[in-house]
Amino acid sequence: MDGGGGERWSAVADAWAELWGSLASPVWPPLLAAAQVTTGTRVLDVGCGTGELVGHLVRAGAVASGVDPAPAMTRRAREQHPGATVRGGDVEHLPFDDDAFDAVLAVNSLQFADHVDDALAEVARVLAPGGRVGLACWAEGARNDLDVVERAVAEAYEEDVPPDGPLRAPGGLESALAGGGLEVVAAGVVDVPWTVPDDDGLVRGVLLGEDERTMAELAPTVLAAAAPFRASGGGYRLANAFRWAVGRAP
Ligand SMILES: C[S@@+](CC[C@H](N)C(=O)[O-])C[C@H]1O[C@@H](n2cnc3c(N)ncnc32)[C@H](O)[C@@H]1O
């Protein structure tokens, strides 16, 4: 899925939770440490999806909130994590008061904002003075095995592969934070391997959001492109990376 839109994400909520929901978990420890999230910290996860990070925040003792424009995503996050506040909304219109949070996180979601500058201005509004913003997203395509498979799919359709967005390049997240008036305090790159147990999971994960006919048509392309990433114990393991950065508000 490369587009935003609550309805599109709602339609894939269950498959997202099953196949992708934990992908970003290796980035959570450094992101939360640099954002100084600890017991009692008021944290908002923007674009929380099916709520895996929200659950992690609850377990860490934070006062956890999540927001996402996709109703099926927020419904699932709410059901799974009743200890958190989860609301519907997008990053440019956050349904929370000014200065409501000590930290705001956006993992694999800021790229869907219509305007990153406006999104970060809205994040700054709900952030208390001196609060921290933690961002994470896919690193540049060259670092990701998934890119190899997505290129094969694009070629099958004789489509151009969309270029990496500015957030994915080295320094991209830091530039966005600085552009939003935040002082960058930490940044890094983390391995986020994607594992699936079988061919079916691979095809449904890569082609998330496509209809069944398209999945059947493209399955041979996906399987051939992913052959180098077969895991010795079965299924597939694609090596990928996320970049992350944390900024501090004045
Ligand atoms: C790739 S998923 C990531 C979900 C979750 N953060 C994770 O790491 O599993 C992107 C999420 O961003 C949400 N999203 C799309 N457009 C958005 C926007 N304008 N503002 C906030 N979230 C948005 C989608 O509904 C979806 O749940």
Image (tube, rainbow, N blue to C red):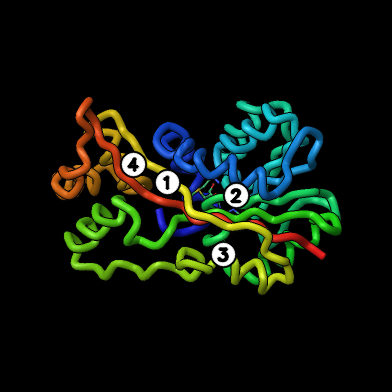
Q: Which residue is mark 3?
A: 173
The residues tagged by marks 2 and 3 sit, at their Cα atoms, a distance apart of: 16 Å
**Residue type, label 1:** Asp
Residue 47's label in the rendered image is 2
User: Which marked residue is nearer to the observer: mark 1 or mark 2?
Assistant: 1
- Distance of label 1 from label 2 (alpha carbons): 21 Å
Reading the chain from its start, which is encountered first: label 4 or label 1? 1
Question: Residue 92, position in %: x, y?
Answer: 68, 62
Looking at numbered disc 4 in the image, what kind of residue is underneath it? Gly
245 relative position to 12: left or right: right
Going by the image, does 54 lie left or right of 194? right
The disc labelled 3 sits on which kind of residue?
Leu
Residue at position x 70%, y 43% in the image: 87
Residue at image position (81%, 35%) is: 40
CB atoms at circles 4 and 1 under 8 Å apart? no
From the image, tell me which residue sits under label 1. 191
Q: Earlier in the sequence, mark 1 or mark 2?
A: 2
Precedes in sequence: disc 3 or disc 1: 3
